[in-house]
Image: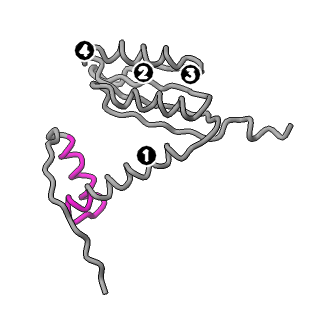
Amino acid sequence: MRKVLKMMRISMSLPKKLLADFDEVLKDRGYQSRSKGIRDALKDYIVRYQWMNEMEGNRIGVITVIYDHYYTGVMESLAEIQHDYRDEINTSMHIHMTSKYCMEVIVVNGDVNSIRELTEKMMRLKGVDHVKLTSTANGESFDPD
């Protein structure tokens, strides 16, 4: 017996380029339905969020932030947030990607709760298009002494 899923119909607004890029990915991956692709993307987003919230202890990692440097106040807000978390930030690098977009690569080391808070504060900023945290246990767990 096959389980029938209750589906909810939603409506959303997307920039034309984002939708075109998404449709291209769906085509390349062989999806027959935009809805199926959106469901899979949402599941992936939820899994990544849950993974980030399950981490414990001290971590070392990299936060990558891509933002529109023409967006009013975004650079100042990013700098202010980074100053607030200077104990967790080891170094950062600024990269000019295009005439519009910049990338910050931020190396972090410390308590995962602070790193997660830092990451999520940057995610919420208007003008920030993408934030990704990649982390692992810090070197203390590798040291046999």
Q: Residue at x 50, y 44 (%)?
A: 53
**Side of 121 where 22 appears, left or right:** left
* Image position of 20 (left or right of 111): left
**Amino acid found under the numbered disc labelled 1:** Tyr
> Which-is-in-front pick, marks 1 and 4?
1
Q: Which residue is mark 3?
A: 89
Q: Main secondary structure of the magenta part?
A: helix
Three-letter code, disc 4: Thr
- Residues under labels 1 and 2: Cα distance? 26 Å
Q: Which residues are magenta?
A: 18-37
Residue type, label 3: Ile
Distance of label 4 from label 2 (alpha carbons): 19 Å
The Cα–Cα distance between marks 1 and 4, rounded to whole angstroms, is: 28 Å
Question: First in sequence: mark 4 or mark 2?
Answer: 4
Residue under label 2, please give it.
95
First along the sequence among labels 1 and 3: 1
Which residue in the protein does label 1 denote? 49
The amino acid type found where label 2 is placed reads: Ile
Element type at mark 1: helix
Contact check, label 3 and label 4, Cβ < 8 Å: no
Q: In terms of secondary structure, where does tag 2 sit?
A: strand
Q: Which residue is mark 4?
A: 72
The C terminus is located in which quarter?
top right
How many callouts does the rendering have? Answer: 4
Query: In the picture provided, is 3 more to the left or to the right than 131?
Result: left
Give me the residue at 36% from left, 12% from top. Answer: 76
